[in-house]
Image (tube, grey):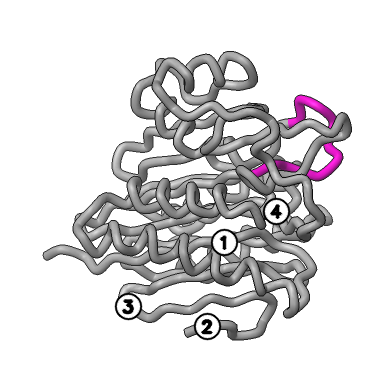
Amino acid sequence: MKSRCAIAIHGGAGKIRRATTRLERPALERALQAGYRILQDGGSSLDAVAAAVATLEDAGVFNAGRGAAPNADGEIELDAGIMDGATLRAGGVAAVRRIKNPVAAAREVMEHGRHVLLAGAGAERFARQRGLKIISTSYFHRNKVSKYGTVGAVALDRAGNLAAATSTGGIAGKLPGRVGDSPIVGAGVYADNAACAVSGTGDGELFLRSVLAFNVAARMRYRGESLARAGAAALAQVARLGGRGGLIAVDCGGRIAMPFNSEGMYRACIDRRGRCMIVANDEHVSA
């Protein structure tokens, strides 16, 4: 019997004022629908998360893709990762500057590369060879739109396969060359059909140290915890290290969890029953 599909996305965690949702809410809705349409048409969870994250990258209102925050030198450096829960294949790019959609490059690394993670000029050369769009630095927004961090998506398709993708511009003012958790398997992105798919947003260094995304899946597989309990426990471990942030996750039964310990988190989902919601902070923004 085919499973029902489900998808969740996020636009970053942090302090979010209700007034700031004017731009972010429509972008979340577009990304959510872009991914869900693929699932409804029988497409793969990989296609769905890639489409959703690319839409968020293109929106220019999140700290990813076009809206990425600059580093300490005023330059843009982007990270992204993607993982297939059916095969445990994964791909990532780090510290890239001119790839329009880093999530697409991460997928190319996963599907056509010899490695799991490529960085810097080598990643850009690979992306160009694979025919991906390379842009000039003038493409990136240099405005005062508030940045709330990483974007990501997780999905379950009708075939029962899970996938996750995460993309970010990293910490505003970071040291050049800094790579966060987003492209790292098990830290900012993880998917395993035996457990769940996870995308994180928050204090990347602490997500790396706590292996946040894998921690959720491991708790489910080895402790038998529910998705909700595993997600909350993994985030609590980050909090004990002094970290803040959130995650989105979907399990192999289509259940969704979106916990966070920051003041707010842009998040949206369509669950296995087809119910849609878009929220920021603890306020219900859309249904």
Residue drawn at x 76%, y 64% is 14
**Residue labelled with disc 1:** 10
- What type of secondary structure mainly makes up the magenta span? loop
Residue 41 in the image, given as x and y percentages of width and height: 21, 60
| Label 3 neighbour load within 10 Å: few <14, some 14-19, many 20+ | few
> Residue 160 versus residue 170: which sits nearer the camera?
170
Q: Amino acid at mark 1?
A: His
Label 1 to label 3, Cα distance in Å? 18 Å
Which of the numbered marks, if any, corresponds to residue 274? 3
Compared to residue 85, the image places residue 26 above or below, namely: below
Label 3 to label 2, Cα distance in Å? 14 Å
Mark 3 vs mark 2, foreground winner is 2
Specify start and end residues of the magenta stretch as a single range.
168-178
Labels 4 and 3: the sequence-earlier one:
4
Q: Amino acid at mark 3?
A: Gly
**Residue labelled with disc 4:** 149
**Residue 153 counted in the magenta span:** no
